[in-house]
Amino acid sequence: MTLTIDIASLIGDALNALRDQTELEAVVEPQVQPTVDAVIVIKRGPKVWHFNTEVKPWVNRTTLGFLKEQIRAGVGEWLLVTRYIAAGQADELRAMNIAFLDTAGNAFINQEDIYVFIKGQGVGRDRGTRKGDIFRPAELKVLFAFLCQKGLEAKTHEQIKKMTGVGLGTINRLIRALELAGYILKPKGRTRRLVRKRELLEQWVMAYPQRLRPKQMIGRFTGPREPW
């Protein structure tokens, strides 16, 4: 399945989060160069900074490689805008001097007369849910099942437990959090229905490497001879 993103919406959410955290003014230039996703202008009093902007729903090694090459080439100042940067990724990006913004309010900008570094803002905070309600490891397992098995969210909690192997308390909390975030609808007299699935899948893909994948490793093993 190919994931698409609304670039304007993602940038707008990230700039709003930056304003909330720092009170910096930021706008998108109307004329965009064909080689960049956008040009963002950040203002503080008379000072103005322009950034060529790369927009990605999540961060991977390919994205970082591209940005490092652009920085080496000296082609303007670059800024990564994405949905979420975990604390470890924020430290890594700062070490590489790669500026970034995300929709949770995390940011790093290191230019003459301006320095911003914010990390640890939780994914999902903009939707009014408690940190981790949807994206903790156990919840991610159930959410994956909901996304893969059509109609599973409408089953009883016992049936969902049998399908996923996750406890009833976790299932109850997840369904409630999805309802509060507007991802599950339950019209009067009807069963639960999962909506905005593409958006939810994008967020699951973003959260999985940070929250669930590290817990899936059983161990590292060596064969008795080479080659094994």
Image: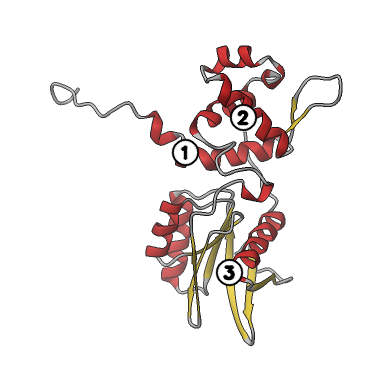
Relative horizontal placement of residue 201, taking residue 70 as reference (left or right): right
Relative horizontal placement of residue 35, taking residue 211 as reference (left or right): right
Give the numbered dot on residue 211. Answer: 1
Report the number of numbered marks: 3
Q: Nearer the viewer, residue 130 or 206?
A: 130
Disc 3 element: strand
Q: Is residue 11 above or below residue 75?
A: above
- The crowding category of the residue bearing disc 1, from other C-alpha atoms within 10 Å (few below 14, some 14 to 19, many at least 20), is some
Q: CA distance from mark 1 to mark 3?
A: 30 Å
What residue is pinned by disc 3?
52
Residue type, mark 2 in image: Arg
- Sequence-wise, the earlier of marks 1 and 3 is 3
Q: State the image coordinates of residue 20 (x, y, percent, origin top left).
A: 65, 64
Residue type, mark 1 in image: Arg
Disc 2 element: helix
- Nearer the observer, disc 1 or disc 2? 2
Q: CA distance from mark 2 to mark 3?
A: 41 Å
Q: How is the image coloured?
A: secondary structure
Q: State the image coordinates of residue 83 (x, y, percent, origin top left).
A: 59, 51
What residue is pinned by disc 2?
173
Relative horizontal placement of residue 77, taking residue 220 as reference (left or right): right
Residue type, mark 3 in image: Asn
Disc 1 element: helix
Q: State the image coordinates of residue 124 (x, y, percent, origin top left).
A: 61, 46
**Where, by quadrant of the figure, is residue 161 drawn?**
top right
The answer to whether marks 2 and 3 mark residues whose Cβ atoms lie closer than 8 Å is no
Q: State the image coordinates of residue 28 (x, y, percent, origin top left).
A: 69, 69
- The crowding category of the residue bearing disc 2, from other C-alpha atoms within 10 Å (few below 14, some 14 to 19, many at least 20), is some
- Sequence-wise, the earlier of marks 2 and 3 is 3
Q: Nearer the viewer, residue 34 or 153?
A: 153
Q: Residue furthest right?
A: 188
